[in-house]
Amino acid sequence: MNASLKNTLKVSVVVIMLLALGIGFWSRSFRPDPSAIAAAETRMWQAYYAADPVRLHGELVMLLQSQFKASPEDANAIAQRLVMAAWKFETSADNYEAVVLPDLEAAFGEIRRLTKRSFDPKEAAKAELAWWVARRTPGQDSPQQVGQKIGAVYAILYGSEEPGFTEAGILRAEAGKLRDDKGPACDWRQVESLLQRSYQTLTKAI
């Protein structure tokens, strides 16, 4: 797998999983299992490092259907927009808002339609792009910095400010950094544990 495709998958995995949380946790009558989500995301990251996009896609579809009750059509529509945004982000050096925001805004628009929430897709898209850019920018890419920006996305999606949102974001950013630093040699049990704690924290904060 070439470097551009690997980087695109890396971005899309993180972003799709972040947005997938919104599909399930917005339903007050349905609570996905944080342990199952963490295990699935860990398998997705492992598929990425094994250069296996087919397995990666299969894990995502299965997760969206089993844990978030999304239809295949909805899952594919959201994923298509996100992967396009990720690809454009990967191949762009600047002017991110003009290049990337249209696809991100469309993805959030699909999620708003699906969940019948009232958040602003453009505002959510800008917050989402902010942490993508932070991960790419030296001096702004620490788990604390990135995690705060992820927490800001949660606040927009859920319509409230909760300390647990930032905590959940930082835990996810720590898992991502551990994976990025060590690659396939990372401690996957530790990655999964951080992700599980992140989703448990988010569930409590909502």
Image (tube, helix red, strand yellow):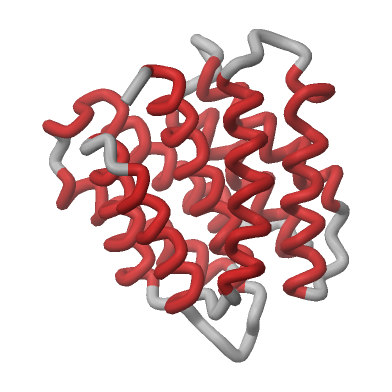
Q: Nearer the viewer, residue 166 or 193?
A: 193
Quarter of the image for the N terminus: give it: top left
Rendered position, 205 above or below 27: above
Residue 58 position in % (x across, y down)? 38, 60
In this view, the residue farthest toward the bottom is 29
Q: Nearer the viewer, residue 160 or 65?
A: 65
Q: Residue at x 59, y 52 (%)?
A: 79
- Horizontal side of 99 relative to 199 (left or right) equals right
- Image quadrant where residue 150 sits: top right
Residue 127 position in % (x across, y down)? 72, 38
- Horizontal side of 7 relative to 93 (left or right) equals left
- Image quadrant where residue 6 sits: top left
Residue 109 position in % (x across, y down)? 81, 56
Quarter of the image for the C terminus: give it: bottom right
Q: Residue at x 35, y 55 (%)?
A: 41
Q: Residue at x 78, y 62 (%)?
A: 159
**How many discs appear?**
0
Q: Nearer the viewer, residue 64 or 22?
A: 64
Q: Residue at x 21, y 38 (%)?
A: 50
- Horizontal side of 190 relative to 8 (left or right) equals left
- Image quadrant where residue 132 sits: top right
Residue 51 position in % (x across, y down)? 27, 35
Rendered position, 110 above or below 188: below
